[in-house]
Amino acid sequence: MAGAFHAIRESPPRVLLVDDVLTTGATAGVCARILREAGARRVSLATAARAFSGPLPSRYTRRQGPRLGLWLPEDVPR
């Protein structure tokens, strides 16, 4: 990803990056670094889904009631 992105002007102080699927996080990491170098004080990331390698443990896929959601490995299932 090195050299793939660059800022064309000064960044606003707060930036929200939006990505459809988070895989390794390399793209988001590089974009966040470039934005910080361009003046952003805070860079946040929102994604619609996260890719996992291999099957998810059942504790992350159980659904209780009609609520849908995505639990990440560090989250406590609700």
Image (cartoon, rainbow, N blue to C red):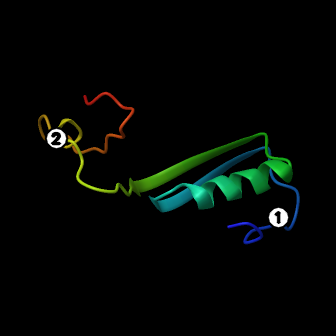
Residue 25 located left or right of residue 73: right
Provide the residue designation for mark 1.
7
Choose between 65 and 55: the one closer to the eye. 55
Q: Which residue is drawn at 16% across and 41% down?
A: 58
Q: Single out the mark in the foreground, 1 or 2.
A: 2
**On residue 58, which mark appears?**
2
Residue 71 located left or right of residue 62: right
Snapshot quadrant of residue 3? bottom right
Choose between 54 and 39: the one closer to the eye. 54
Q: Residue at x 27, y 56 (%)?
A: 54
**Where in the figure is residue 1, as x and y percent of width and height?**
67, 67
**Where in the figure is residue 10, as x and y percent of width and height?**
88, 56
Snapshot quadrant of residue 8? bottom right
SS at badge 2: helix
Which residue is outermost to the bottom?
A: 4
Count of numbered circles in the view: 2
**Where in the figure is residue 59, as x and y percent of width and height?**
19, 35
Vertical placement of residue 58 versus 48, above or below: above
Q: Which amino acid does label 2 sit on?
A: Ser
SS at badge 1: loop
